[in-house]
Amino acid sequence: MKKILIIDNSKVTISMFKNTLNQELDLEIVAAHSLEESKKYLQNGSFFMAVTNLNLPDVNRNENLELLESYNIPTIIFSSQIESKLLEDKKFPNI
């Protein structure tokens, strides 16, 4: 079974993602509430993809994106704030 990593410090947001994904897809969903917790999961398993918030309490700038990129994990980013510099650096298509 494919695994997806959801990284967010909000229990409500994680619950929403889990409920939606469990209804629609056959995936194992792993939830991390911090960058440190996500590092532990990434070291112990492989993930099909990740969904992450940019604003985590233990993240400086884009550490979570750099971490996921170092594992070559396709990532969906959700946030109320996305800097244009980030978009330029990552060369996101169609945004």
Image: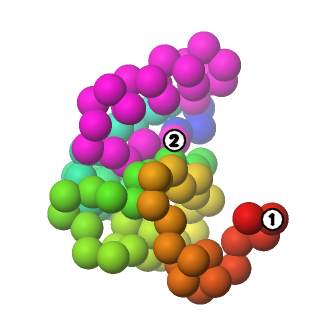
- Mark 2 to mark 1: distance in Å? 24 Å
Q: Does residue 12 belong to the magenta stretch?
A: yes
Q: Is residue 4 above or below residue 84?
A: above
Nearest the eye: 36 or 89:
89
Residue 11 is marked as none
In the rendering, at what x and y percent does residue 44 appear? 33, 53
Magenta-highlighted residues: 4-27
Quadrant of the image containing the N terminus: top right
The colouring scheme, among rainbow, by chain, secondary structure or one colour, is rainbow
Tag 1 residue: 94
In terms of secondary structure, where does tag 2 sit? strand
The number of callouts visible is 2
In terms of secondary structure, where does tag 1 sit? loop
Is residue 41 visible in the rendered image? The answer is yes
Amino acid under disc 2: Ile
Q: Is residue 52 above or below residue 66?
A: above
In the rendering, at what x and y percent does residue 93 appear? 78, 69
Amino acid under disc 1: Asn
- In this rendering, the label closer to the viewer, 2 or 1: 1
In the rendering, at what x and y percent does residue 95 appear? 74, 65
- Place residue 54 in its image quadrant: bottom left
Q: Does residue 3 belong to the magenta stretch?
A: no
Picture residue at 42% right of the left edge, 43% below the top: 6
Nearest the eye: 95 or 43:
95
Tag 2 residue: 4
Left/right placement of residue 43 relative to residue 51 reads left
In the rendering, at what x and y percent does residue 64 appear? 37, 66
Q: Residues within 10 Å of mark 1 (few under 14, many from 20)?
A: few
Q: Which label's residue is closer to the chain start, 2 or 1?
A: 2
Picture residue at 53% right of the left edge, 55% below the top: 77
